[in-house]
Image (cartoon, rainbow, N blue to C red):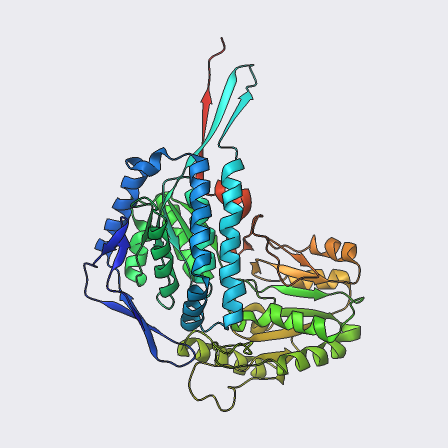
Amino acid sequence: MRGYDHLFIDGGRRASTGGGSIEVRSPATEELIGRVPDGTPADIDAAVAAARRALEEGPWARTSPRERADLLGRLGKALRARSEEFTEVISDEVGSPRTWARTGQIATGLGVLRAYRGIAADYPWEERRTGVFGNEVRVRRLPVGVVAAIVPWNAPLFIAALKIAPALAAGCTVVLKPAPQAPLAVYLLAEVAAEIGLPDGVLNIVPAGPGASEHLVRHPGVDKVSFTGSTAVGRRIGELCGHDMRRCTLELGGKSAAVLLDDIELDEALADRLVDGAMANSGQVCMAQTRILAPRSRYREVVDALGTAVARLRIGDPADAETQLGPVISEPARVRIERDIARAVDDGAKIVTGGGRPPGMARGWYVEPTLFSGVDNRMPIAREEIFGPVAVVIPYDSDDDAVRIANDSDYGLAGAVWSADPARGAAVAGRLRTGSAAVNSTAPMDLGSPFGGMRSSGVGREGGPEGVTAYVEHQTIVMPIS
C-alpha cells in the first residue's frame, strides 16, 4: 500500500484544497494498493502559478541549454538507481508483467532522458542567416512557456518522460497530470526530481479527475498542452485549445497493421514476435499491431502459426517472472473488450483461440488473448481500437491490396512490414500512411526520431529534435543593414 496525502507543487509537498482521494487498485488482485489526493481546480491554479513563477522569475529562467542537458542526465541517473522500485510500482498499478515494465517502461524512459540530454546540447537554439536584402537575420527558439502534460495509465513513466524531457530541454516548466488509474509511478518521479534538486516550480504534479483536468487544459496560464490518450478525449482537448489559440500536441489512438509479404519465412520465432507486437502489455499499447495482414495464398498457414503462438502465451501474476500477459487495467475495460469480442463473433469473425476469461483466475481483470480469422477490414473489430489482447488476421491478394487495406483506417499511427527482402519491405512501408513504420520489427519507434500519428491518431510529433521543436516558439530578429 502506497499512500500519498499531498500534491507536488512548487518543489514541495502541498495538501490539496479538497478532501477527495483517488484509489488505485491492482488489476491483478483487485486489492487497494494506493491512494492519492484528487486534485481540485484550485490545486491546478496553484500548480500553474508555481510553473509561471519558475519560468519567468526563478533560477530556471536563467539556465543554459547545457545546464538543462546536465539536469536531464542527473534525472536519468537517479531514476536508474531506483529502477527496481519503479518496475514494481508500474507492474502493480498497471498490471504489466515485471519484464515488460522493466523493458517497456524503465529502459525506454531512461532512453528518452539520454536522448534529450544529447539533443538539448546540440539543438540550434539560435541561428544567424543572411536575409534576402543582405541584412542579418537572427532566428531564436524560445520556450513556449508553461506546459500541461497529461499522461495515460498504460505507460505512465515512459510517456511522462516523452513530455518532460523535451519540455525541460526547451526551458519550459510543466504541470504534469497522471491518469487516475496509475499515478503512483509519477509520484516516484516527483521524489526523484526533488532528489536531484530540480528548481522549485519547474515540475508540478497534480492527479485529478475530468473536471479539474479540463480546468488545466483551459487554464489561461497554460501555453501548451501535450496529451496522450484516447482519440475521443484528444478531440475535446483539440477543440478547447483551438478556441483559445493554445498550442497542443495530441498522440492518440491506433489500429496498426503488420503486413506480412508473401516471401516471409514464417517460423515459430517470427510468430512469437508478431503476437508480441499485437499483445504486449495485454494489447494496451497505442501502436499495437493488431491487424495482421497475410497473403491469401498463405492465409491458413499464418492463422495456424499465430493461433499456436497466442495459445502458448503464459497468463498470470504480473510479479511472476514467467508471466507474459497480465490483466487489463479495470473491470469496465474487461467488460468492453468482451463486448467487442462478442460483437465480432456476431459479425461472422471466427475465434481461432481465446475469447473468454482464463480458467482458474477468479480474481483480477484477466482476458484470454484472442485471435480472430475470417475478418473483413470493414468489420468493427478491424476498425476500432480495442486496447486489449485481441488481434485479427486479414487476407490480401497483392502488395497493392495490402497497402490499400493497411491504409483503409481512421487511424495512422504506426505499422510494420515483414519481408525476406528488407528493401522490398521498406518500399511497401514507405507507402503506408502512418507516422512511423518498421521493417521486420515490432518496434516502429526510435527514441531519437519523431513519433506521432496521421488522421485520427493525432497532431504533432514527440521524440527527437522535432520533439523539442514542439516546445519552442520561433522569434525572428531582423538587424539593420550597416
Residue 324: % across, % down: 56, 76
Residue 459: % across, % down: 50, 50
- Residue 22 sits above or below residue 400 on the image: below
Identify the residue at image location x=44%, y=58%: 81
- Residue 127 sits above or below residue 234 on the image: above
Farthest residue to the bottom: give it.
Answer: 360
Q: Quadrant of the N terminus?
A: bottom left
Query: 270 or 81, which lies in front?
Result: 81
Identify the residue at image location x=49%, y=58%: 252
Query: 306 or 257, which lies in front?
Result: 306
| Displayed quadrant of residue 21 | bottom left
| Displayed quadrant of residue 421 | bottom right
Query: 478 or 272, which lies in front?
Result: 272
- Residue 337 sits above or below residue 443 on the image: below
Left or right: 40 with respect to 235? left
Identify the residue at image location x=54%, y=64%: 103
Residue 467: % across, % down: 50, 45
Whether residue 346 appears in this view of the structure is yes
Identify the residue at image location x=62%, y=58%: 444
Residue 82: % across, % down: 42, 61
| Displayed quadrant of residue 93 | bottom left
Left or right: 328 with respect to 246? right
Query: 448 or 145, which lies in front?
Result: 448
